[in-house]
Image (spheres, grey):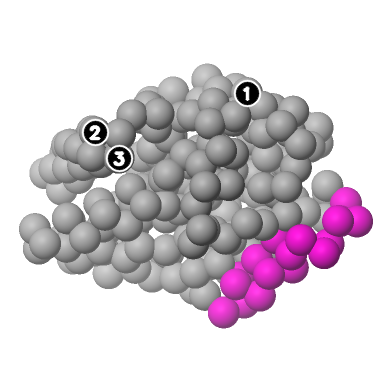
Amino acid sequence: MKQGIFITAEGPDGAGKTTVLQKTCELLESQGHDVLLTREPGGISISEQIRHVILNKQNTEMDGRTEALLYAAARRQHLVERVKPAIEQGKIVLCDRFIDSSLAYQGHARGLGIDEVYRINQFAIEGFLPDATFYFDIEPEEGLKRIQKSGDREVNRLDLEKLEFHKKVREGYFLVMKKDPLRFHIIDARKQLESVLEETKNKMLEIISRKLQ
């Protein structure tokens, strides 16, 4: 049996990556691919419970290091319980966020240090990285406007951070991408959904075709 493919989606809040990932998953399935769509933090019971603690709007006193450790713990359980088994079964795993979120949010925006947060996460993932990562880019101002306009999107503790925090998140992503440029595919999330979806679909099909050869 062939090994599966691990593809992640990243981006600032309000970039629309979750919607695009869902629609791309449906497209791949319609073409006969065996796809698992999952998310971080979450995807399984233990990690969803940790997600509730991290994103609960009442937990305003949470320390940055505590936050980083909780994300890493949720990531570890999700990886060993759901992601790795699916890849071993030959599935295409599409994951909404992974390690790069921690590097941008806690490493850079929280000021803990990208390298420091990377070391925490290496303990959790043991060097296991995505085959490809799609970064959906949007200015924080626009992303936050989208969140405010959306009535069905979960508004969590990180969404309520000040604009400066979200600017640092975006800045952090670009620093992370410089460290591993070949893994990342940048998508302009400011465009209309149909255009973003088309670009994502084409690039993802190219990656899958190359990987499965």
Toward the bottom, the furthest residue is 45
Give the residue at x 60% y 29%.
Answer: 141
Picture layout, residue 125 above or below residue 198: below
- SS class, disc 3: helix
Q: Nearer the viewer, mark 1 or mark 3?
A: 3
Residue at the spot of label 3? 193
Residue at the spot of label 2? 195
User: Hey, what amino acid is under mark 3?
Assistant: Leu
Give the residue at x 56% y 42%.
Answer: 13
- SS class, disc 2: helix
Where in the figure is residue 78, as x and y percent of width and height? 53, 67
Give the residue at x 63% y 23%.
Answer: 171
Find the magenta span and give its range: 45-63
Q: Is residue 109 magenta?
A: no
Where in the figure is residue 169, as x and y percent of width and height? 65, 32
- Determine crowd level at label 1: few under 14, some 14-19, many 20+ residues with C-alpha closer than 10 A: some
User: Hey, what amino acid is under mark 2?
Assistant: Ser
Disc number at residue 171?
1
- SS class, disc 1: helix
User: Hey, what amino acid is under mark 1?
Assistant: Glu
Q: Is residue 62 magenta?
A: yes
Lower sequence index among marks 1 and 3: 1
Query: How many numbered badges does the structure rendering display?
Result: 3
Picture layout, residue 152 above or below residue 63: below
